[in-house]
Amino acid sequence: MFLFSPEKLLVILAVAMVVLGPDKLPKLAGQMGGLWRDLHKWRERLEHEARGVFPDLPPLETIAQAVRSPLSYLDRMADTHSEPTAPTAIATVDPSAAADSVRSRQSSSAPDRMRDGGASIDAYDPFLN
C-alpha cells in the first residue's frame, strides 16, 4: 500500500505537531488508528464473503499483482498453462455442395427470399443482388 521511509514519517509527524499542537495530536492519532482498524476489519469481512461466493478465487496478493501489472500476470499465467491441448475438430465442406448453395442463393433475389420467410441472414445482404 503506502510505504513511508522513517524520514518521511518524521517529517509528517513534525508538520502534524506544528499544525495540530501537542494537545490534539494524541486524540487524532487514536481516531486514525480506529479508522485503520475498521478499514482492516471491513476488508477482511469483504474478502471472507467473496471467498464464500467464489471459492476458487486466487489469493489477494495475486489479484493485487494482476491489477498492478496485468501483462506480467498474463505472461506468467501463459507460462504455467502452456500444456498442449487436444486438437480441435475441423469441419470439412464438400466444395460442390458449397458451390450449389451459393448458386441457389444468387439465383433468387433478396425480395423473393424475404417473401419465403427470410430464414437466411443474407436475405438482407445488399451485395447479393
Image (cartoon, rainbow, N blue to C red):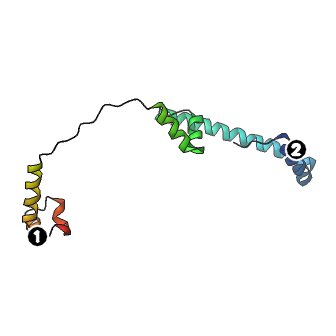
Determine which residue is flagged by label 2. Answer: 10
> How crowded is the residue under tag 2: few (<14 C-alpha within 10 Å), some, or many (20+)?
few
Mark identifier at residue 18: none
> How crowded is the residue under tag 1: few (<14 C-alpha within 10 Å), some, or many (20+)?
few
Asked where in the image residue 29 lies, by quadrant, the reply is top right
The residue that appears at 19% across and 41% down in the rendered structure is: 91
Q: Is residue 29 left or right of residue 62?
A: right
Q: Earlier in the sequence, mark 2 or mark 1?
A: 2
Q: Is residue 6 left or right of residue 84?
A: right
Residue type pointed to by label 1: Pro
**Residue toward you, 45 or 96:** 96
Asked where in the image residue 70 lies, by quadrant, the reply is top right
List x then y, in percent, for residue 114: 11, 66
Which tag is nearer the camera, tag 2 or tag 1?
1
Do residues under tags 2 and 1 come within 8 Å of each other at their CB atoms? Answer: no
Q: CA distance from mark 2 to mark 1?
A: 81 Å
Q: Most extreme residue toward the front, as rendered?
A: 95
Residue type pointed to by label 2: Leu
- Element under label 1? helix
- Element under label 2? helix
Of the 4 image quadrants, the one containing the N terminus is top right
**Residue toward you, 1 or 87:** 87
Determine which residue is flagged by label 1. Answer: 111
Q: Is residue 70 left or right of residue 18?
A: left
Q: Is residue 10 left or right of residue 73?
A: right
Number of disc labels: 2
List x then y, in percent, for residue 101: 10, 55
The residue that appears at 52% across and 35% down in the rendered structure is: 76
The residue that appears at 19% across and 68% down in the rendered structure is: 127
Of the 4 image quadrants, the one containing the C terminus is bottom left
The residue that appears at 8% across and 50% down in the rendered structure is: 96
List x then y, in percent, for residue 109: 9, 68
